[in-house]
Image (spheres, rainbow, N blue to C red):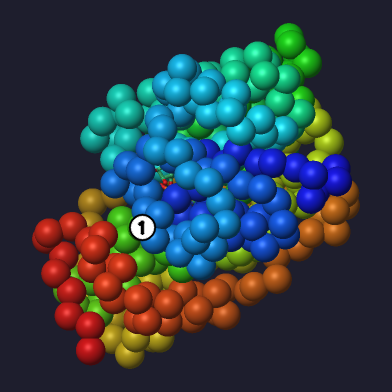
Amino acid sequence: MRRAMHKLLVTGGAGFIGSEFVRQAVKRSYKVIVVDKLTYAGDLERLNEVKGKFKFYKVDICNKNKIGQVIKREKPQVIINFAAETHVDRSIVSSDPFIQTNIKGTKTLLDLAREYKIERFIHISTDEVYGDIEKGKFREDFPLKPNSPYAASKAAADLLIKAYVRTYNLPAIIVRPSNNYGPWQYPEKLIPLVSLRALNNQKVPVYARGQNIREWLYVSDCAKAIMLILENGKLGEVYNLGSAQEKKNIDVVKSILRILNKPESLIEFVADRPGHDFRYSLDFAKIRKQTGWCAQIGFQDGISKTVNWILDNPKWMKKHIGKKLSIKFK
Ligand code: NAD
């Protein structure tokens, strides 16, 4: 792909990972069109660093007419779909918006990609589509066995994409990253939530005994990998993006408390999340072999950068925290 020639339509570009991707894409001279519904999780402030260097449309990806108009006007060659409902706990309370955006929204984009002969459709999926694994690692060809409504909605989208690739030769690629962390993450997710509660000297809730394991990938590493896949990935393929940085939740929480100089007595074990996946672990040899990509930021460095970013951005954090969580920064 000759990148300077290409115009990217990035859905969910005002979200946590999407905005990091947009910042990197603008810096690499791509023309970027951001489409985002701006749900509770979306915020254009994440894109302040590249303000004026991308176009923005506030549109729902389920709205075929409006997205069609954007594509007609902007003529992007590529669609990168980050837009999604993303919080597992919310999907347990109500899965409707997850079914709507993650499945129907993706289907709408797939149909439009066909209609407008989009050259590349890059879909951001998740490691959660595989279910959990006690030992070993998930390869891209492993069966999908999702356990939460969120993961099921993401797996449904993946299957739909595979069907469009096979049936219509749609030029699509699926990317499955592991747990992301870093600046600008919405404070309902583990790392910003724990940081905020600890800063406020509030109890830090940890599911069960905190033994569940996640593979932590720093957001800039994730976005870099998606860029490489955009430029060099093979159509029709699935790519896992892992970091090999596996951590028990309890150890993640303890690292945050250490950085903030807060006591471990703040930890409060609470009833486990229903259907809680025990461990995710990805085999990411494929992307490594094809592009040479490998995560650059190790967990200790990444967690310290993330917590320090939170300390440096009290205004943004305050704007997004629930009413129950008032926060006193020093
Ligand atoms: P996020 O919740 O921070 O952002 C999602 C963005 O999508 C928001 O800006 C929101 O406004 C937008 N959006 C939601 N519904 C929309 C709709 N109907 N139309 C248009 N825009 C809509 O999510 P994130 O953490 O940045 O995740 C981005 C993608 O990566 C998602 O597809 C998610 O499933 C996937 N993913 C995330 C992680 C992670 O750890 N955060 C890990 C693996 C995969």
Residue 318 vertical position relative to residue 256 in the rendered view, above or below: above
Q: Residue furthest top?
A: 167
Q: Position of residue 207 (x, y in %)?
A: 31, 56
Work out whether residue 258 or residue 177 is closer to the camera in this orientation and state it.
177
Does label 1 point to a residue whose CB lies under 8 Å from ligand 1?
yes
Residue 67 vertical position relative to residue 325 in the rendered view, above or below: above
> Residue at (27%, 73%) from the top-left corner?
315
Residue 39 left/right relative to 166 = left
Which quarter of the rendered picture does the N terminus lie within? top right
> Residue at (22%, 57%) from the top-left corner?
270
Residue 176 left/right relative to 3 = left
Can residue 294 be seen here? The reply is yes
Q: Position of residue 309 (x, y in %)?
A: 43, 77
Number of residues whose C-alpha sits closer than 10 Å to that of mark 1, classed few (under 14), some (14–19) or many (20 or more): many
**Number of disc labels:** 1
Q: Position of residue 235 (x, y in %)?
A: 80, 31
Can residue 216 be seen here? The reply is no
Work out whether residue 134 or residue 91 is closer to the camera in this orientation and state it.
91
Disc 1 designates what residue? 186
Q: Position of residue 110 (x, y in %)?
A: 60, 21
Which of the 4 image quadrants contains residue 145?
top right
Residue 287 left/right relative to 142 = right
Q: Amino acid at mark 1?
A: Tyr
Q: Secondary structure at mark 1?
A: loop
> Residue at (72%, 20%) from the top-left corner?
117
Residue 81 left/right relative to 48 = right
> Residue at (59%, 19%) from the top-left corner?
112
Which quarter of the rendered picture does the C terminus lie within? bottom left
